Amino acid sequence: MDFTLYWFMFPISVLVATTAMVSGIGGAALFTPIFLIIFPLLGPEYTLQSAAAVVGVALLTETFGFSSGFVGYYRKGLIDFKSALPFIAVGVPVAIAGALVLQFVNRSVLTGAYGALMIVLAWVMIRHHAPVEHEIELLTSGEKNGREPRSITGADGTVYTYLKPRQGKGAIATSIGAFLTGMLSVGIGEVVMPQLAKQNRVPIPVAAATSVFVVIVTIASASFTQISALIASGGVSAVPWNLVAYTVPAVIIGGQIGPRLQGKISQNLMERAIGILFAVIGLAMFVVTWQGLAPH
């Protein structure tokens, strides 16, 4: 195993992790297309052996990258652990199921499904997002419907008061996002954050912190499943450790740089840029899928 082969992934991974932390997207959304599209163009020695290896490394890398964000939010005291539990209870087992299904999916199916997912996410990112208002009247207007008030006090003394989040029918979206995360490495964060912030009107700082916690637990479970399956089927050498050796320390660094840039870049501009990038990735995935299915 040549540990100099993927040296270039260190600076790339720092950039990806920084972008992920600033924009709020999962780093695996960018790592997976790099592994699936760019690596094969560099030569056969760079191509990862299987779809499971691609997603497994992307999830493992994202786990370490998001851990930096989790630590930051934990120190700020913004994570609502109780509200996160219902999402985790649904997300973790479904993500594990998605990870197990991936073992039977070939690369063409993976690229096609990933391309479709990227196109959908591109539309979500590009469309206009109206700011979510959190009026204190929500707590006294009689719209509680049996939901108890909840408050989180941040490390800076700021008190965030809101109604206890309900998942309800959102469990379907959580399940879909979790399954896609286990199989395609992205999806859970994109469905949990809107449920907390828009549907349940949880203040953005608390919603973001709680969403990060849900994502961490979900992707860690899926990653452990993927890596364990790889080792069980092909031994320890089935995991591309020579790639992980560069991506993991790099995303830890990027995870610290990103929060420092928060607020210095227009969020709307960043979301639109990421949306355009997702659209390009989606189209590229379709091209790769077509080439793989076309007769030679």
Image: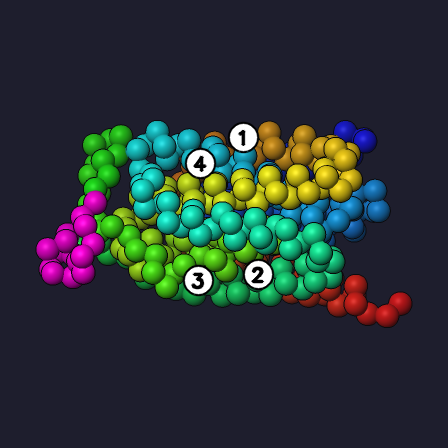
Along the polypeptide, which appears first: circle 2 or circle 3?
Answer: 2
Can residue 279 be seen?
no
Q: Position of residue 77 (x, y in %)?
A: 30, 33
**Magenta residue check for 64:** no
Disc 3 secondary structure class: helix
Q: Which residue is mark 4?
A: 69
User: Disc 2 versus disc 3: distance between alpha carbons?
Assistant: 20 Å
Depth check, mark 3 against mark 4: the one in front is: 3
Splitting the image into 4 quarters, where does residue 8 fall?
top right
Disc 4 secondary structure class: helix
Q: Which residues are magenta?
A: 136-150
Task: Give residue 118's mark.
Answer: 2
Q: Amino acid at mark 3?
A: Ile
Depth check, mark 3 against mark 1: the one in front is: 3
Q: Position of residue 138 (x, y in %)?
A: 16, 56
For the residues bearing labels 4 and 2, Cβ distance under 8 angstroms: no
For the residues bearing labels 1 and 2, Cβ distance under 8 angstroms: no
User: Disc 3 versus disc 4: distance between alpha carbons?
Assistant: 26 Å
Task: Give residue 172's mark.
Answer: 3
**Magenta residue check for 144:** yes
The residue lying at 24 percent from left, 56 percent from top is 133
